[in-house]
Image (cartoon, grey):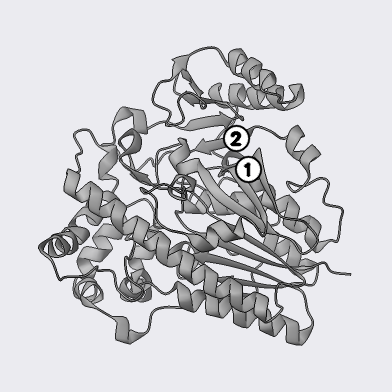
Amino acid sequence: MSGRNVVLLVVDSLRAQSLGETDACPRTPFLHRLGEEALAYRRAYASECWTLPTHVSMFTGRLPSAHGAHFQSMGYVRPEPTLAEVLSAAGYSTDLVTRNFVFDGTIPGIVRGFQRRHRPLAPGSRANLAGVLLTLAKPRVRRYIRRTGFFHPRHSDARAFVTTFARSLLPADDLALARVLEVMERGRRRRRPYFVCCNLYDVHAPYPPARDSLFGPWRSLRGVADNVMLPIQLARLGQHAYLRDGFHVSAHAHRALRDRYHAAIGLMDEKLAAFYDTARACKLLDDTVLIITSDHGEAFGEHGLYLHDASVFNTHLHVPLWIRHPDLAPAAIEDVVSTRDLFGLIRAVARRERLDETIVDADYRARHSIALAEHFYYPRLTDAAPQFRQNLIAAVSHSSKVILRGDSVLHYDLLADPAERAPTPEPLEAFARSCRAAGASTHAANAAVAHLKRFAAGLVQAAA
């Protein structure tokens, strides 16, 4: 007998640190309300810093070094089944909803197991100035796609992809969430359990600040300057320019990018509220596990970085996570968890297994209280600064963190230094001691350090 329905909403590029209650953060009343109606995980961490590897980690429960889908391979070719394959084999209807190009079927393996894929694009009437300019500049777009590492090499040669690329940038997550509701309604009519994964793209760069446009208001000189600056700055960032020596972003451009990002988050909050309230009013959540999270964060100058690349810092790893299960009482959870453990939770839900071996169980979290993250660098950017041409690994506990960068072992006291600005060089055993002192189990501390040592010794490779 199949288990409950599962809806997984992944808000692409939504970092946890932008969801605070200070004046510097956008207003997100729905997400704060959701924290009172679901399990709200305050210390959830992604396993990589960009979309492909983090989704495959959620789809397989494995670290990037084990599943192998990252910048150095650009595909998932391992034989282990994905979450969609597991649930499809269990009788579930499986749907993927997004306009994110990572899931268009070009990158091998990423959409395995999904019986249907939906790509809701903004209607042609929304083809505003940005879309027109991109459509007229197809050769330039092809060159841009070839130079940036976030695309598969085959994307630049696909005529249909280049033609629709501009439309895929226009905000359309209201349509994506409406499609999720349609899939949920269809599943109820057919009395067949369903798994829906929806990657929501409106918080991702270029951070649309309006519901139907890539541009903000033109009514002021500041608005005009911001809109004119947008394509120039984003084109530079999208080609990994921030990884080269001498890169600089003006204070004006920095502020404009962050303001756009926060505006996009506020709009996303409204869209999620409308989806949630409709689903609940229609009783679609009565037998459904709803998970809302992010695949990674975003940088706006922290550690000299922008977008999401070359990082195992918390600006990219620390993500929000809410789990609403019909049988579980709401709670705020401060334990460290990894989003790759969503694989085990969703599999257990589908199999109607006990949940005491998943992240909703306190004892399980106590045994897995250290989150690991890895980053495999983009090898085709040959002129990147040396510090960005090396694989990275990090381990995060409740109060401390360690990053291995080349031969360096850098420790961070997350209580005294939450922005990770003042590392201290110490042996890995010091990290294990600090974890145990903070209450981590000896097994968890020893397992984390063992993996860090294997990674540093080159025994953990970029799996193919």
Specify whether 310 is left or right of 430: left
Which residue sits at x=44%, y=54%? 13
Specify whether 220 is left or right of 31: left
How far across and how far down the image is residue 175, in percent?
Answer: 48, 79
The image quadrant that residue 151 belongs to is: bottom left
Mark in front: 1 vs 2: 1
Write down the residue under mark 2: 372
Disc on res. 205: none
Q: Residue furthest left?
A: 221
| Circle nearer the N terminus (1, 2) | 1
Q: Residues within 10 Å of mark 1 (few under 14, many from 20)?
A: many
What is the spatial separation of the Cα atoms under label 1 and label 2, in whole angstroms?
Answer: 8 Å
Q: Quadrant of the C terminus?
A: top right
Specify whether 215 is left or right of 19: left
How far across and how far down the image is residue 450, in percent?
Answer: 66, 23
**399 and 202: which one is in front?**
399
Specify whether 450 is left or right of 17: right
Which residue sits at x=47%, y=59%? 28
Q: Amino acid at mark 1?
A: Ser
How far across and how far down the image is residue 379, in percent?
Answer: 38, 40
Q: Secondary structure at mark 2?
A: strand
Please indicate, yes or no, whether residue 263 appears anywhere in the rendered image.
yes
Write down the residue under mark 1: 338
Q: Amino acid at mark 2?
A: Leu
**280 and 292: which one is in front?**
280
Relative to 67, does residue 290 appear above or below in the rendering? below
How far across and how far down the image is residue 274, in percent?
Answer: 53, 75
Please indicate, yes or no, whether residue 110 appears anywhere in the rendered image.
no
**38 and 258: which one is in front?**
38
Q: Quadrant of the N terminus?
A: bottom right
Q: Do the numbered discs 1 and 2 sit on residues whose CB atoms are within 8 Å?
A: yes
Q: Secondary structure at mark 1?
A: strand
